[in-house]
Amino acid sequence: MLTWLTPYRVKLELHGEELGDFIDGVGYELLVSERFVESFRAEGLTGLEGFHPVEVVRVRRMTKKKREPLTVPSYFVVWPCFGRAAVDLVLNRVRVSSPPTCTECRATGIDATHGFVLEPGTWAGEDIFRPRGMQGRVVVSARFKHFVERHALTNMQLTPTEEFVRDPSNLGPAPLPTA
């Protein structure tokens, strides 16, 4: 993937009533509102890099209803860090097309995920990060979850890792490891 370089300009699509505090990007980038940034910094949370201002060039409403004028918050582009935390290769409920060939990144072709856990002792305490072996996913700490709830931040769906399911081909969960 290419790195997004300045100037940071976006066209947004609005599918609801108002723009949220969090917008998932196309690559590894995320857009977060100024309210999110101020609260994140005030609470001393960790794991995000960047915090560059973004110019919102256009907002396209995806519904036809007449509405009040839209207030567009200030947004910043951030990147969740690639953490040292690693997905546990034994306890995962992940179906893979081939085992990982690199013990560092643990990258593999993931066909289906029915929950995953981190290998004990690999997480360094970041509040938001991308784990090794599941680089396309963003994982957050319990502290981050409470931060989102406390500040009523919008447009985020947090799912416990053991309940996370992505199975586009309906393969079902991987078999449980045998003792």
Image (cartoon, helix red, strand yellow):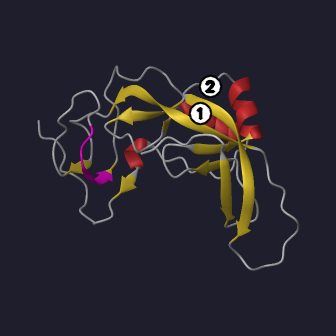
Is 153 included in the stretch rendered in magenta? no
Residue 143 appears in view: no
What residue is shown with label 2?
45
Q: Residues within 10 Å of mark 2 (few under 14, many from 20)?
A: some
The answer to whether residue 34 is seen in the rendering is yes
Closer-to-camera residue (27/86) = 27
- Quadrant of the rendered image containing residue 121: top left
Quadrant where the C terminus is found in the figure: top left
- Residue at 47% x, 41% y is 138
- Compared across the picture, whether 157 is left or right of 131 comes to right
Mark 2 lies on a secondary structure that is: loop
Q: Nearer the viewer, residue 33 or 26?
A: 26
Q: Position of residue 86 (x, y in %)?
A: 33, 30
Task: Check contact, mark 1 vs mark 2: CB within 8 A.
Answer: yes
Residue 55 picture location, percent across and down: 73, 48
Q: Mark 1 points at which residue?
A: 144
The amino acid at mark 1 is Phe
Magenta highlight range:
107-113
Residue lying at the far right of the rendered structure: 68
Estimate the spatial distance between the alpha carbons at disc 1 and disc 2, rounded to whole Å: 7 Å
Q: Earlier in the sequence, mark 1 or mark 2?
A: 2
| Residue 3: percent from left, percent from top | 49, 40
* Pair 1/2: label in front: 2
Looking at the image, the residue that sits furthest to the left is 179
Regarding mark 1 in the picture, which secondary structure is present there?
A: helix
